[in-house]
């Protein structure tokens, strides 16, 4: 070999070595990036799990029970095969013996392979079932790209964040008049309770006309009893159905406004009834 050929070979080896070092560095960098992305996604999914648990507890849904243990007859899995005990291994020609176990029947501790019938031999040889036919080994699964799987997991996490945000918005709305503002909801509830008290007031007026209720009791119910019932009824309704599932603190119930509405609406309704009755007469 001439000096020029030796120098060219040395340069080729040096270039191959540099290329190998660059490839190893790039692969190491890719693995570090993948590990960092997996750790970040793991923390993100953990936070999502805690947030979903909070949402479930807020709306009164307990965590689902864990799945039952795998029963007999479950599909084959590599993890189960890795831990399952296999048949005893007999050394072959390349495992320390000249002819293996079959070639040394007289050696101590070594026996020849047992002769099994055809049916038992077929049962003793495990084969993966494929759609093409029974007994044909199935194709190996195509190797997946970790970066592609990580990107798919990140997209699913983004979708879970979007749905979780929508669930939080829904959980921050009360069951009663969810699209209304708190003030409008309180006015509607107190006014509705006042209207119901007005119906009871008309019943008492009719009862007073037939002599079942005297004038003092009628005035007490109109001025104090029915407005108080309407006020406390609205207060309880707002506390039961006007409270969101997830809210920081106690939502406002506008007590002065409710007191004013209830204690003015019922007497005003009675006055309107008297004016209407006198007008019609």
Image: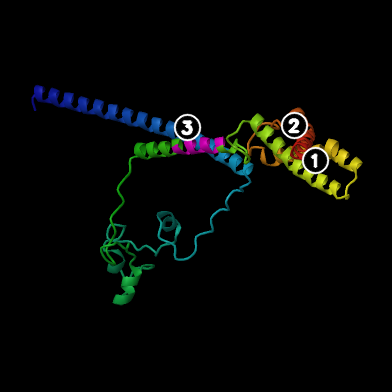
In the image, taking residue 58 as reference, residue 258 lies left or right, namely right
Q: Residue at x 62, y 38 (%)?
A: 174
Q: Quadrant of the C terminus?
A: top right
Q: Give how far apart the Cα atoms at labels 3 and 2 are.
A: 55 Å
Q: Which mark is residue 261?
A: 2
The residue where tag 3 is placed is 40
Disc 3 packing (10 Å; few <14; some 14–19; many ≥20): few
The image shows residue 48 at horizontal and vertical percentages of 53, 37
Q: Is residue 191 above or below residue 21?
A: below
Mark 2 secondary-structure assignment: helix
Mark 1 secondary-structure assignment: helix
Q: Quadrant of the N terminus?
A: top left
Label 3 with label 1: CB-CB less than 8 Å: no
Mark 3 secondary-structure assignment: helix
The image shows residue 131 at horizontal and vertical percentages of 28, 62
Q: Is residue 247 above or below residue 18?
A: below
Q: Residue at x 52, y 35 (%)?
A: 165
Numbered range of the magenta stretch: 159-169
Quarter holding residue 103: bottom left
Disc 1 packing (10 Å; few <14; some 14–19; many ≥20): some
């Amino acid at each position: 070999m001439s000096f020029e050929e030796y120098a060219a070979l040395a340069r080729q080896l040096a270039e191959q070595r540099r290329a190998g070092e660059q490839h190893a560095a790039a692969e190491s960098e890719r693995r570090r990036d993948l590990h960092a992305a997996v750790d970040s996604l793991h923390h993100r999914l953990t936070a999502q799990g805690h947030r979903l648990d909070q949402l479930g507890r807020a709306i009164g849904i307990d965590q689902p029970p864990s799945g039952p243990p795998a029963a007999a007859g479950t599909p084959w899995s590599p993890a189960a095969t890795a831990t399952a005990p296999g048949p005893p291994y007999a050394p072959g020609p390349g495992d320390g013996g000249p002819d293996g176990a079959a070639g040394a029947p007289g050696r101590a501790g070594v026996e020849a392979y047992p002769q099994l019938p055809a049916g038992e031999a077929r049962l003793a040889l495990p084969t993966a079932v494929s759609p093409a036919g029974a007994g044909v080994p199935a194709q190996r699964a195509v190797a997946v790209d970790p970066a592609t799987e990580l990107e798919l997991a990140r997209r699913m996490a983004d979708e879970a964040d979007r749905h979780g945000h929508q669930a939080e918005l829904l959980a921050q709305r009360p069951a009663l008049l969810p699209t209304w503002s708190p003030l409008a909801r309180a006015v509607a509830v107190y006014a509705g309770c006042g209207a119901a008290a007005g119906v009871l007031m008309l019943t008492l007026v009719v009862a007073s006309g037939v002599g079942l209720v005297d004038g003092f009791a009628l005035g007490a119910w109109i001025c104090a009893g029915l407005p108080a019932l309407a006020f406390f009824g609205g207060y309880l309704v707002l506390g039961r159905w006007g409270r969101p599932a997830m809210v920081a603190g106690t939502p406002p119930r506008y007590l002065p406004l409710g007191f004013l509405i209830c204690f003015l609406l019922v007497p005003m309704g009675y006055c309107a009834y008297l004016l209407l009755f006198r007008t019609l007469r």
